[in-house]
Image (cartoon, rainbow, N blue to C red):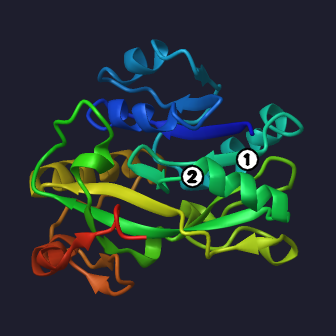
Amino acid sequence: MKIDVYSNMHNEEVILPFWLRHYETIADRIFIWEDESTDATKKILSKHPKVTFLPMEKHGDDDVYWTTTLFPQYEKYSRCVADWVIIADADEFIYHPHLLNVLEEEKRKGTQVIQCSGFTMISEGLPTTTGQIYDEIKIGLPDKTESKWTIHSANIRVRYPKGRHGPIHEHNAFVRNRETGIKLLHYRYLGEKYFEERDKKILERNRMVYHFKKEYSRQESRTRPDGTRGPVLDWYAERKGRATNVVDNL
């Protein structure tokens, strides 16, 4: 079993050590598009023996460029080399206590594309563990927007829509499975301060690409984890008390 992981990174020094610690346990190779970070992100990545940097010509938070130009590069590096490809953002952790066994079984059955059940993980602060982040932060809420087809065979032609939130192009032609028990743990809400600061940075990166003048607002109406629209931080404030253990509960 050979697994290649792909991700684009910009200023992720806080979560990146946990991300690498997780994916190094399952990945043979980790391919990164490093997007002009100004913090220690590139330095951390450079020291990891499994990381290879891939070139990129456009910078900024440009989902269209990522999905049409960057992500398809797996065909060059992974086709006929790896069994599975995982494309995961810096705050996305593909989780199952027996992940490699599950992927081996799915390959045996002929599965080509796997949907992971999405959860937004909840913490009032940053993780402090020297182990895996999901051993410390285990509670979360179901997240419809994070249930993604994010694992696929290296030998099929996959094209994702903007944001990777919808079905992959031509997914009906593939052998699919959404009932494997594999979860996508989205470590986005690590306290209100971290969440809001990250949101502001993403907005600034968006403005680089799309040149809009919109200012950050906590009350902006956006798609929330349950699929409704409204202020996102208000949604967390109202519901985080309902979070349950989604790591140990399979």
Mark 2 nearby-residue class (10 Å; few <14, some 14–19, many ≥20): some
Query: Where is residue 37 drawn, in percent x and y?
Result: 38, 27
Q: Quadrant of residue 165?
A: bottom right
3 w.r.t. 46: above or below: below
Which of the numbered marks, if any, corresponds to residue 107? Answer: none
The C terminus - image quarter: bottom left
Q: Residue at x 51, y 31 (%)?
A: 24
Q: Residue at x 47, y 54 (%)?
A: 97
Q: Quadrant of residue 129?
A: top left
The secondary structure type at the circle numbered 1 is strand
| Amino acid bearing label 2 | Leu
| Amino acid bearing label 1 | Trp
Query: Which residue was labeled with disc 2?
Result: 99
Q: Residue at x 84, y 70 (%)?
A: 174
Query: Which residue was labeled with disc 1?
Result: 84
Q: Residue at x 67, y 37 (%)?
A: 4
Task: Tell me which label, 1 or 2, sits earlier in the chain.
Answer: 1
**In the figure, is residue 86 to the left or right of 20?**
right
Q: Is residue 10 visible?
A: yes
Residue at far bottom of view:
228
The N terminus - image quarter: top right
Q: Is residue 56 visible?
A: no
**In the figure, is residue 29 to the left or right of 171?**
left
Q: Nearer the viewer, residue 60 or 47?
A: 47
**In the figure, is residue 69 to the left or right of 224?**
right
**In the figure, is residue 213 to the left or right of 181?**
left
Query: Where is residue 40 drawn, in percent x and y?
Result: 31, 20
